[in-house]
């Protein structure tokens, strides 16, 4: 087996996969599947009929990579360092209602979903609603651009930041494999950084509950359509939110970020009801809007970060993560994007993967928008396409190990809790590595293109 002395250098692959003994791969793949079953690294199995209906029935291991992906330590440290700054930035932006409304005003005209969110936000501005306790559980995603060696932000998620639970398990799985097979592979399990995202998120939720200061109140997790909340929810004159007679201290949104989460008016009424209440919302409507792609693009304009952050060094660190971001009213960039569409990604104001436009479709969409001459262009932003280095990887899905060329996206979780002037939590909490087949544009784990991964510091 051929590995270089350090395991990896820079962005080179962790292992020379051609050199890895096939028997060893099979042994590790088997062990990793057993480990997943024993430790709950599992998801619902779509092929099983009763999956999701009967607890404990119809589960399959989550898709994961067999070995961790190499990642430069200095870049990882940088991403961790900026996490608290991004947390603070979201909080500051959330307090500037006019900035949110103005920045999204053109989008509002053409994007019905964003318009509904903005309507709720406007209502809160009208009644001068104040959120004294503010909780953010974010995930800032990055790709390491191979050519420039810059770690560039893909997006900042402020709602339903996913995989804080499973990502830590994949870290543990990889550590366990390297403890057993590291010597044969020439890899050291201690080079995989710890990943306590899930416990840190839980702690932040618990602290928000403590701040609310009513031992009888509960944390409510909104999982699917909010119909029940509309029926059973009640707002008392003092702002207390009751659902089914229970007082709610904290609302955590695991849903509500995509139009399909609002199949009827009932869900919108529920969202408004929760927003009007004094329950801590994770996220509040302002935090939610602060995480939109349009706001990301506005923040990247010259002198905008300076409106929200004071410290020059912090501003410089954040700005260094920004890729090229443009609105579609910039005619020069439109011409360039039509000429070289492969260098850009076009993004609507959506979450959850599978919504972006790439390659030839960018040109076609831009041409269509120009021809139609409507304001639909305001629904999108344009972003510089980032090209991470490609490395051969073992991907595990449905119990089968595939070898393929893959690229990775690093997510850094951040938790923020504030009560009036007091910052109670502002920290980086663990990470998520997702690795996807290099030939796919989008990389949803749930969508079936990407796998969960961890990192091996080099
Ligand atoms: P979502 O909120 O739907 O997750 P993202 O902005 O994260 O939207 O885009 C989805 C996926 O598209 C990312 O996970 C990444 O794989 C790919 N992607 C997004 N922006 C870029 C970019 N600028 N360069 C390369 N790939 C990108
Ligand atoms: Mg997102
Ligand atoms: Mg994303």
Image (cartoon, rainbow, N blue to C red):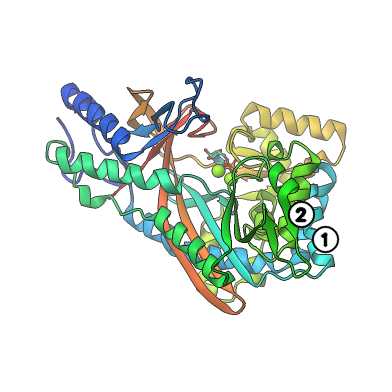
- In this view, the residue in front, 364 or 285, is 285
Total marks placed: 2
Label 1 with label 2: CB-CB less than 8 Å: yes
Q: Is residue 317 left or right of residue 289?
A: left
Q: Secondary structure at mark 1?
A: helix
Instruction: Look at 54% across and 64% down and name the residue there.
Output: 87
Instruction: Look at 75% across and 46% down and name the residue there.
Output: 231
Q: Disc 2 beta carbon < 8 A from ligand 2?
A: no
Instruction: Look at 40% across and 33% down and name the residue there.
Output: 62
Q: Is residue 449 left or right of residue 6?
A: right
**Residue 100 % position (x, y):** 74, 60
Q: Is residue 91 visible?
A: yes
Label ID, residue 123: 1
Screen quadrant of the N terminus:
top left
Label ID, residue 174: none
Nearest to the eye among marks 1 and 2: give it.
2
Label ID, residue 272: 2
Q: Secondary structure at mark 2?
A: helix
Callout 2: few (<14), some (14-19), or many (20+) C-alpha neighbours within 10 Å?
some
Query: Label 1, label 2: how many angstroms apart (C-alpha)?
Result: 9 Å
Labels 1 and 2: the sequence-earlier one: 1
């Amino acid at each position: 087996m051929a590995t270089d002395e350090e395991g990896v250098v820079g962005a080179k692959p962790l292992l020379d996969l051609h050199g890895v003994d096939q028997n060893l791969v099979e042994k590790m793949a088997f062990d990793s599947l057993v480990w997943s079953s024993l430790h709950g690294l599992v998801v619902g199995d779509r092929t099983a009929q009763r999956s999701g209906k009967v607890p404990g029935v119809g589960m399959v291991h989550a898709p994961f990579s067999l070995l961790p992906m190499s990642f430069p330590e200095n870049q990882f440290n940088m991403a961790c360092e900026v996490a608290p700054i991004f947390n603070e930035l979201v909080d500051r932006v959330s307090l500037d209602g006019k900035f949110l409304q103005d920045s999204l005003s053109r989008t509002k005209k053409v994007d019905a979903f964003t318009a509904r969110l903005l309507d709720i936000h406007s209502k809160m501005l009208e009644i001068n609603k104040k959120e004294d306790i503010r909780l953010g559980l974010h995930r800032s995603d990055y790709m390491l651009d191979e050519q420039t060696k810059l770690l560039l932000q893909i997006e900042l998620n402020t709602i339903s930041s996913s995989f804080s639970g499973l990502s830590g398990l994949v870290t543990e799985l990889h550590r366990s494999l390297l403890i057993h097979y590291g010597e044969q592979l020439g890899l050291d399990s201690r080079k995989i950084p710890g990943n306590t995202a899930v416990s840190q998120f839980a702690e932040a939720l618990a602290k928000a509950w403590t701040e609310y200061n009513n031992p009888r109140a509960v944390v409510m997790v909104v999982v699917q359509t909010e119909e029940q909340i509309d029926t059973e929810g009640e707002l008392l004159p003092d702002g207390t939110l009751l659902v089914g007679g229970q007082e709610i201290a904290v609302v955590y949104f695991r849903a509500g970020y995509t139009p399909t989460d609002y199949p009827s008016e009932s869900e919108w009424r529920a969202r408004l009801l929760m927003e009007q209440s004094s329950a801590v919302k994770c996220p509040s409507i302002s935090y939610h809007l602060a995480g939109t792609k349009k706001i990301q693009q506005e923040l990247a304009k010259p002198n905008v970060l300076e409106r929200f952050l004071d410290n020059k060094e912090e501003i410089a660190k954040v700005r260094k993560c920004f890729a090229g971001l443009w609105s579609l009213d910039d005619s020069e960039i439109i011409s360039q994007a039509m000429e070289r569409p492969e260098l850009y990604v076009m993004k609507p104001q959506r979450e959850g993967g599978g919504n972006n436009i790439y390659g030839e479709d960018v040109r076609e969409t831009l041409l269509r928008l120009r021809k139609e001459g409507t304001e639909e262009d305001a629904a999108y932003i344009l972003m510089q396409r980032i090209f991470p280095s490609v490395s051969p990887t073992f991907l595990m899905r449905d119990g089968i190990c595939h070898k393929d060329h893959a690229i990775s996206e690093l997510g850094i979780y951040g938790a923020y809790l504030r009560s009036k002037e007091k910052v109670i939590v502002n920290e980086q909490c663990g990470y998520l590595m997702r690795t996807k087949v290099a030939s796919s544009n989008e990389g949803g784990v749930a969508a079936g293109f990407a796998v969960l991964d961890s990192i091996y510091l080099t």
